[in-house]
Image (tube, helix red, strand yellow):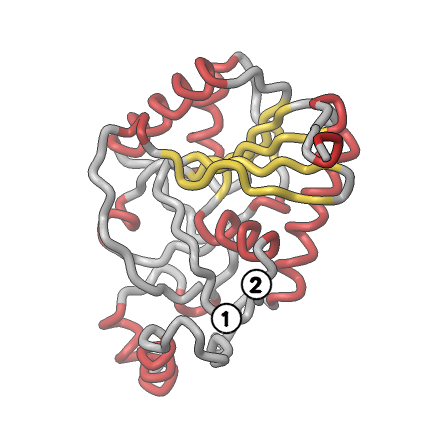
Amino acid sequence: MLDLLEVTPAEVTRLILVRHGRTAHNAQGRIQGRAEIPLDAQGREQAQRAGEWLRKQYVIHALYASPLSRAYETATIIGDAIALSPLVTTDLIEFDFGIVSDRDAEELAQLEPALYQELREWLTVTWDSPMIRPRIPGMEDEAAFRARIVAFWDTIQQAHRGQTVAAVTHGGVIKGMLTLIAGGDLRRHMPFWADNASISVIDFHKGGATICLFNERSHLGEPLKHRRYIIL
């Protein structure tokens, strides 16, 4: 029976997911999507804390990053701590929220009242509801979203077998990855939350994927806030 539980590290690709540090939009509760919003002072401090924690906990062989500035800056700060330069890949870019991006609720209610009402209903469904996410003009197709997540997984498993890689990305991408591994539907609510500069770990072994750590945030020294459904 023990042989069914044994794992040879040389056969595993470990993926460390880091959400970017805080931005002004995060602090205000505005959806960023692919808008270029830089880190704020707290976000840079969070990135430094994440980098130091990673340096102490892991030997990391490669560092990947989304091209959006908030993720790339976070990766650069982390890279300084672990002596690696970020490799940029668009597979890690944030989910495209279409016309909802870079707008607050009041703006959306004025510009798209029908969509605003649909989204209000979407945010109040129960956990077991079969309701599918309303279609937002300009929103990324969920099939394309899934395809680029899987493409990134394939890339790192081919290039980094037996190694540990870190990837600095976005809340939507982290939620999407965890949802897929848990067998969820990307068109429905994704029941995960990743805090700014939090750390999650996935191990890939012979085609399987195991979530080993989720939303590690002890390095931040910040209280855990209450959360609710959001659009993704």
Which residue is under mark 2? 184
Relative to 25, 132 lies left or right: right
Mark 2 or mark 1: which is in front? 2
In the rendering, which numbered label is found on residue 229? none
Residue at 25% across, 31% down = 41
Residue 107 position within the rendered picture, expressed as x and y whole percent measured from the top left: 27, 71
Name the amino acid, label 2: Gly
Residue at 63% across, 23% down = 62
Residue 196 position within the rendered picture, expressed as x and y whole percent measured from the top left: 35, 40
Residue 152 in the image: above or below residue 181: above
Residue 3 position within the rendered picture, expressed as x and y whole percent measured from the top left: 75, 31
Q: Residues within 10 Å of mark 2 (few under 14, many from 20)?
A: some
Disc 2 secondary structure class = loop
Q: Residues within 10 Å of mark 1 (few under 14, many from 20)?
A: some
Residue at 40% across, 66% down = 231
Residue 49 in the image: above or below residue 188: above
Mark 2 and mark 1 residues within 8 Å of each other at the beta carbon? yes
Give the CA separation, mark 2 to mark 1.
Answer: 8 Å
Residue 75 in the image: above or below residue 170: above
Relative to 91, 104 lies left or right: left
Quarter of the figure that contains the C terminus: bottom left
In this view, the residue farthest toward the bottom is: 114
Name the amino acid, label 1: Arg
Toward the viewer: 58 or 115? 58
In the rendering, which numbered label is found on residue 188? 1
Toward the viewer: 155 or 225? 225
Relative to 215, 90 lies left or right: right
Toward the viewer: 229 or 41? 229
Residue 48 in the image: above or below residue 214: above
Quarter of the rendering containing residue 54:
top left
